[in-house]
Image (spheres, rainbow, N blue to C red):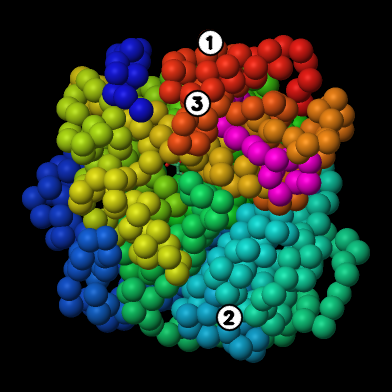
Amino acid sequence: MSSESFENLSYEDRTFSPSETFIGNANAKSDIYDEANKDRQAFWEKQANRLHWDKKWSQVVDWQLPFVKWFIGGKLNASYNCLDRHVLEGRGDRVAFNFEGEPGDTRTITYTQLLSEVCKTTNALIELGINQGDRVAIYMPMIPEAAIAMLACARLGAMHSVIFGGFSADSLLSRIQDADATLVITADGGYRKGAAFALKPAVDEALKGVTNVKNVLVVKRTGQETAWGGRDIWWHDLVDKQSDKHNAEFFDSENGLFILYTSGTTAKPKGIYHTTGGYLTQAAFTHSAVFDLKPETDVYWCTADIGWITGHSYVVYGPLINGATQVMYEGTPDTPTKGRIFELVEKYKVSILYTAPTLIRTWMKWGDEYPNGSNLSSLRLLGSVGEPINPEAWMWYREVIGKNNCPIVDTWWQTETGAIMISPLPGVTATKPGSAMRPLPGIGADVVDDEGKAVGNGRGGYLVLTEPWPSMMRGIWKEPDRYKETYWSRFNNLYFAGDGAKLDKDGAIWLLGRVDDVMNVSGHRISTTEVESALVSHEAVAEAAVVGAKDEMTGQGIVAFVILRGGIEAAKGDALVKSLRDHVAKEIGPIAKPRQIMVVAELPKTRSGKIMRRLLRDVAENRAVGDSTTLADPNVMKLISEGLKSGKSED
Ligand code: WTA
């Protein structure tokens, strides 16, 4: 990537300042940046005091690049901070979750009720032999039991590894094996797009592999026919009979809280490993400062699934620590109508909405009649996460959803960062449509060139983080060398985020997408290599190259180029392409199905054998093919283009 490629970016000069009333009432005021700059450690200590600590830390931070510890010697319990504290301090009757199932069933769960459900589940896990430090795989639809299961693990000091329900049995198995989980918590199924889907069969399929899983705890959600075996236990049989009292034990600040797998640049996903004290501190602080949560009056809704980091930090830990009242919705935004999300905003009087650009663009396509069909006047703040938000979508979000009344916080962060790193503060920042603006107080970020030198305003380069932060990943599970190599070897003393970014003339940060082999499809990270190895594992495929091509709706779409094995006819066309797409869905999950698969005779490679994805991206995005002089065989691109024109390869 050359910094020249950023120079021609259009410059956005609209700014939107918060209203005087918003500024006056904001949780975070403008002096907070100075406060943090003056003494970063004191600033984070102050934020850590948002939590209940059974024992205070003796040292704030220990930074031995690239390994960090925060609040050393402190003891706390994550689940206690999310639940017990509110009940003990008289907030037990406050609603924690307004749950809405896709079919329209609802549950209202107060903090007192959530605490007793979590205690019962904790006691059930104890009965199943789960101890501090054990790993528990959670593979669930978006129902309250998903959060309850996470909080029960945390209560015991056991680590959860949540695997998104859209992942296949194979993906589930490799994650269970990598973390060596001994228990899987799942459901018979869930509801999506107006129908019940099954989850338990994927668990059964996965557990045909070699694992140390002793039990599978199954929530009955849909009541569908479910195969049953000796290790399976219904949630209602085991959990319901437990005592609803459990005294939380306090664990070390650096006790493991969870592992969450995310795609890297190789075929093997990375087990991003987070611990307790620092993670909770930053999740709670950012949730309060960035979303300006007023727990007594706000209704907060983050639409992310619990299977992603956003669901961890901004559905479970951040909001519950802050005593938020939330909406949790099981299904898809178009069921039964394309106005479902807006109807729920009206129904629950949602005041803070946090969602992803891909959904905002989808709403734009569906048309303004859907948001206009509901009363959205309860909204007072809007958030965006997961991928760069284009200025058009940002303006539409502001005007049509926010009625020009709501600050927008475009929040940049990653599974690895654990919590928001770059974002406007809604009562401070004059925002620019499409920019995540600047690092939060206590956070250091910059944009550097190939040599790691700051590019300065008006230029583009690589986004780096310059200071250790509390919710930083503590490593890649069992792979310390890969951790160093991936994040800390590109530049000296800087965390390499893998994103391109530009600083505008005022120093505002504009995110430009990934610069590595990771695609971002509807806000989900998928590795090109992972899809390539899934394709190559199909009997018909000799070689595959995968690129992320620009996609109006999903940000990027997956486009695959495959070379077939000798004797397999490309002319089989559609059926073959379908079977390849299904194969990828089986290997990784439906979210990784290529949008388009093109059968080609050759792939463009350098003399050293590296596939030149840049050229394939040109083809996938219907552009003139760029400089191909370093190709080993200069004719390849011509062959590919001709092959495509002759129509052998379409989806
Ligand atoms: C991208 C999601 C631009 C980015 C919380 C990052 C963003 C990756 C933004 C992490 C944003 C996330 N603007 N890009 N506001 N937020 N990204 O781990 O490429 O699922 O590296 O964490 O998403 O994705 P992850």
**Quarter location, residue 515:** top left
Sequence-first disc among 2 and 3: 2
The answer for how far apart the CA atoms under marks 2 and 1 are is 59 Å
Give the structural element (helix, strand or loop) at label 2.
helix
Reply above or below: 95 against 297: below
Between circles 3 and 1, the one closer to the viewer is: 3
**Residue type for callout 2:** Thr
The answer for how far apart the CA atoms under marks 3 and 1 are is 19 Å
Residue 95, percent from left and from top? 55, 59
**Residue type for callout 1:** Ala
Q: Is residue 473 magenta?
A: no
Q: Residue at x 81, y 52 (%)?
A: 197
State whether residue 162 appears in this view. Answer: yes
The one of 87 and 71 positioned closer to us in this rendering: 71
Q: Residue at x 65, y 30 (%)?
A: 561
The answer for how far apart the CA atoms under marks 2 and 3 are is 60 Å
Counting the numbered discs, the total is 3
Q: Is residue 354 left or right of residue 169?
A: left
Circle 3/circle 1 CB separation < 8 Å:
no
* Label 1 sits on residue: 624
Residue 161, percent from left and from top? 55, 66
Q: Which residues are magenta?
A: 535-554
Q: Is residue 541 left or right of residue 97?
A: right
The one of 482 and 445 positioned closer to us in this rendering: 482
**Residue type for callout 3:** Ala
Q: Quarter holding the C terminus?
A: top right
Q: Is residue 544 magenta?
A: yes
* Label 3 sits on residue: 632
* Label 2 sits on residue: 122
Q: Quarter holding the N terminus?
A: top left
Reply above or below: 633 against 544: above
